[in-house]
Amino acid sequence: MDFYADESGNTGDLARTGPALDFGGQSVFSLAAVGACDESEISRELDALRKKHKVQSSELKLSKILRRKPEFALDAVQLVAKQRLPFFIEVVDKKYQLAVSIINGFVWPPYFNTEESQQTVWLKNIFADYIYNRVPHDVIFEFVQCMNSPSNATVGSYFDRLKACVVEDPHEVAQGLASQVEESKDDFRIMIEREGENAHRRFLPLPDIGKRGQEVWLLPNFSSTAHMYARINLFLKGNLNGCRIFHDEQAHFDEIIAEAKAQAESAKRNPSEFWPPYSDFNFEEVADLFFKASPESVGIQLADIVAGLSMRWYQAHLSDESETEVLDRAIDVLLRHTNRDKGIGINVVGPHNMAQQLFGVAGY
């Protein structure tokens, strides 16, 4: 089986957002992969839909379709369901990803804590929700500035800023945060003694290196690619030999996406340790990754429609938009064909209240 992947929403460095945390007007990122044994069958089905809806364009782009021919988009999703094509969707709330990164660096740094468990993940989610919902944008933006100007001074100052923001709140989560931040700052002092001027790097996300040698911080497509790939591995029960992944061509981030795939393949862990549910990071075999221009692949064009609908659906509900019927109908089709045990469905990296709003279930 081959898999066709495309993204929706700005894929750039989250450290490039402004103080309003608007991420250039695209606060949500999505990545979708659709599996198929025969791309020519998808081509025939989509050609029939083109005739039905009188779509003339040779390349299907959701941004145009949704505005002019929304029923075509709905029929394309019905095609995924009718053909029982496996789909793997990652939706990332970019502000939430920043909140998670603050927790992982300044509240629960990985170098001084016990191994990950279901309990630690649960606590991190609660802390991340607090930061997402209660911490002012200017405090989160100062974390962004730590990535843009990484140093011991900026990181040390952020420990103080974050603690000052939460310590006056009597809420038990805020008090837990304040205590953890204070302990983590002690860890920071220890790390300065050990590593000197490079100590701050232990408390910031690991940057990727762009094609011009620049540091690139927090690309949502990196973690999304790794997790999507692990979900495909679960779906295929580890039998990836001969499997191909065709990703829409990436002028700037192809090497970083390939690195995300490679890191997923090398992330073997003890089965007794905590594992993300509905994915398998123990790779016994590997798939081949190719980048292909979307006009040359109807599979990628179908993935573009699925990714775009998912991104716009989350964004519409995040913004409390009134007109969401078309998006809700499309996503409802996908939700009815979810199979979590096989990794098929929509994984939302977002706060608890959005999981409840969108799915009616707890997010933890």
Image (cartoon, grey):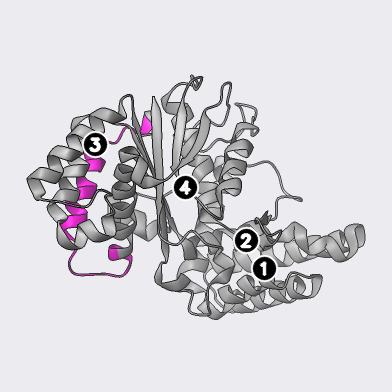
Q: Which residue is mark 2?
A: 217
Q: Earlier in the sequence, mark 1 or mark 3?
A: 3
Q: Residue tagged by mark 1? A: 147
Q: Secondary structure at mark 2?
A: loop
On screen, residue 92 above or below 294: below
Q: Is label 1 or label 4 in front?
A: 4
Marks 1 and 2 sit apart, C-alpha to C-alpha, by: 7 Å
User: Callout 3: helix, strand or loop?
Assistant: helix
Q: Residue at x 27, y 69 (%)?
A: 320
The residue tagged 3 is: 80
Depth check: 323 or 77 in front? 77
What segment is highlighted magenta in the picture?
316-341
**Which mark lies nearer to you, 4 or 2?**
4
Res 180 visible: yes
Percent position of residue 11, x then y: 48, 58
Between residues 301 and 238, which one lies in front from this camera angle? 301
Instruction: Tell me how far mark 2 sits from mark 3, CA to CA.
Output: 34 Å
Q: Is residue 135 magenta?
A: no
Q: Residue lying farthest left?
A: 52
Sequence-first tag of 4 and 2 = 2
Tell me the tag on residue 249.
4
Q: Give the spatial CA distance, label 4 vs label 2.
A: 21 Å
**Mark closer to the chain start, 1 or 4:** 1
Amino acid type, mark 4: Glu
Disc 1/disc 4 C-alpha distance (Å): 27 Å
For the point 25% across and 42% down, which residue is it?
335
Which of the labelled discs sits on residue 109, or is there none?
Answer: none
